Image: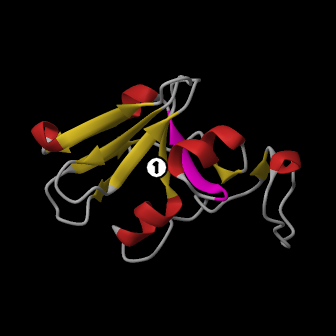
Amino acid sequence: MTKTHKVHCDCNAVTATMEGQPKVHAFCHCADCRELLQVPYHSVLAWDSEQVNITKGKGKVVEFQHPHKRMTRIFCQLCGDILYNTNAAGWKLVSQLMFMKCNDNNLPEGYQSNAHFFYDRRIVDIDDPLPKK
């Protein structure tokens, strides 16, 4: 049986549903994520594009296309909460913080970050035992 997870915006107008397991669960330190999301690093759960769909409130979703990068930010037009973003590989990236907020402040077993990617591009040092790639 395929696992199904849901996240929703703060005002509950929009819901995104994820099917199956994420392909990546890690911290991303790339400049692209920092620029698109205005964060020092991004805690991601990454799914293939077809595994993540808006299942409630499609008419209330705004898609911001970055002007120079093949990345988008998908958010609720009413409350502004970001449901997910996309990267140049076409993956849909749900923030671990968003996932936890919508799922009793928990990540399922095996969804915790297991590495730092693009750590050589970081702007914040992270002192943890995870591999830094």
Residue 101 belongs to magenta span: no
The residue nearer to you, when weighing 121 against 93, is 121
Which SS does the magenta portion mostly show?
A: strand
Render colour scheme: secondary structure
- Observer able to see residue 37: yes
Magenta-drawn segment:
40-47
Type of amino acid under label 1: Val
x, y percentage for residue 12?
17, 62
* Residue at the disc numbered 1: 94
Q: Which residue is located at x 53 percent, y 22 percent?
A: 70
Q: Is residue 3 visible?
A: no
Vertical position of residue 44 compared to residue 51: above or below: below
> Secondary structure under badge 1?
strand
For label 1, the crowd category at 10 Å Cα-Cα, with few meaning under 14, some 14 to 19 and many 20 or more, is: many
Q: Would residue 52 be found to the left or right of residue 39 on screen?
A: left
Residue 105 in the image: state x and y as whole percent: 43, 76
* Side of 66 where 29 appears, left or right: right
Instruction: In the rendered view, tell whether residue 122 sits above or below residue 20.
Output: below
Which residue is drawn at the image coordinates 83% and 46% (left, top)?
121
Give the total number of marks visible in the rendering. 1
Q: Residue at x 50, y 29 (%)?
A: 71
Find the residue positioned furthest to the bottom: 104
Q: Quadrant of residue 74?
A: top left
